[in-house]
Image: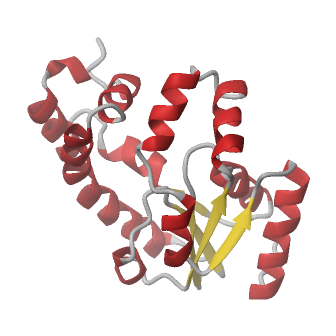
């Protein structure tokens, strides 16, 4: 079974790529979904987040207020480091568990915060990055996801640049164009790998 990471920053189109791969019939393990699962009430990461940040991170129903946490960490580097130290281990364990349950000929792991050590941790065969120019990513966040321009700029500034991402990955899918053009690039990579679902 091939294990392929799909990396990419906010507004680049990583989700668009994985949604298309899911339509093509490939299983997707999304680190954001895993993060939601491991921070549910009663889970160890939930308690650790409450201990670190206080009850302010909780909604009335005791679930984590993800919007509050996102706003906090994207404007405070030390808070982001604290959050990552709490959640990354739990997320990694759950991703490995889900990979182990997969029976397909390939699984795609959507991982915005890809780091070189993930190659060995998840026994990855390839890493693809979906990248867009900063102006395009900014426009998508403002136009399609209703971010304010200041908030979008803050979030883009708090992540790795394209120049930092490119040396870490095996394939780059530039996504400054249309959705159809991105799908064609994904199809080309699937063909190169001999993967022909859907």
Residue at the spot 33% in from the left edge and 31% down from the top edge: 75
Residue at the spot 15% in from the left edge and 37% down from the top edge: 47
Residue at the spot 28% in from the left edge and 56% down from the top edge: 88
175 shown above or below 143: below
How many numbered marks, from 0 up? Answer: 0
In-front residue for pair 24/126: 126
Image quadrant where one finds the N terminus: bottom right
Instruction: Residue at the far top: name it.
Output: 60
Q: Position of residue 142 (x, y in %)?
A: 66, 26
In-front residue for pair 170/25: 170
Image quadrant where one finds the C terminus: bottom right
35 shown above or below 113: above
Q: Locate residue 153 relative to residue 18 in the image: left or right.
A: left
Q: Position of residue 46 (x, y in %)?
A: 22, 37
**Would you identify the image quadrant in which residue 174 lies?**
bottom right
Q: Locate residue 46 relative to residue 192 in the image: left or right.
A: left
**Would you identify the image quadrant in which residue 140 lies?**
top right
70 shown above or below 174: above
Q: Locate residue 54 relative to residue 89 in the image: left or right.
A: left
Q: Position of residue 9 (x, y in %)?
A: 55, 51
Residue at the spot 64% in from the left edge and 36% down from the top edge: 138
**Would you identify the image quadrant in which residue 52 lies?**
top left
Q: Position of residue 130 (x, y in %)?
A: 66, 61
Would residue 100 be seen by someone viewing this image from the given angle? yes
128 shown above or below 64: below
Would residue 194 be seen by someone viewing this image from the given angle? no
In-front residue for pair 168/193: 168
Instruction: Residue at the far left: name it.
Output: 51
Q: How is the image coloured?
A: secondary structure
């Amino acid at each position: 079974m091939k294990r392929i990471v799909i990396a990419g920053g906010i507004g680049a189109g990583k989700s668009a790529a994985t949604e298309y791969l899911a339509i093509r019939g490939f299983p997707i393990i999304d680190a954001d979904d895993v993060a939601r699962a491991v921070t549910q009430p009663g889970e160890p990461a939930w308690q650790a987040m409450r201990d670190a940040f206080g009850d302010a991170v909780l909604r009335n129903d005791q679930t984590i207020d993800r919007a509050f946490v996102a706003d906090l960490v994207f404007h405070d580097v030390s808070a982001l480091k604290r959050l990552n130290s709490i959640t990354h281990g739990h997320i990694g364990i759950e991703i490995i568990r889900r990979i182990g349950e997969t029976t397909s000929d390939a699984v795609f792991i959507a991982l915005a915060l890809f780091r070189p050590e993930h190659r060995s941790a998840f026994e990855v065969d390839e890493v693809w990055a979906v990248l867009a120019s900063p102006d395009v990513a900014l426009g998508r966040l403002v136009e399609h996801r209703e971010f304010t321009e200041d908030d979008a700029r803050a979030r883009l500034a708090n992540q790795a640049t394209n120049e930092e991402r490119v040396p870490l990955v095996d394939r780059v899918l530039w996504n400054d164009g249309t959705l159809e053009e991105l799908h064609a690039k994904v199809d080309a990579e699937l063909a190169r790998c001999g993967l022909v679902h859907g």
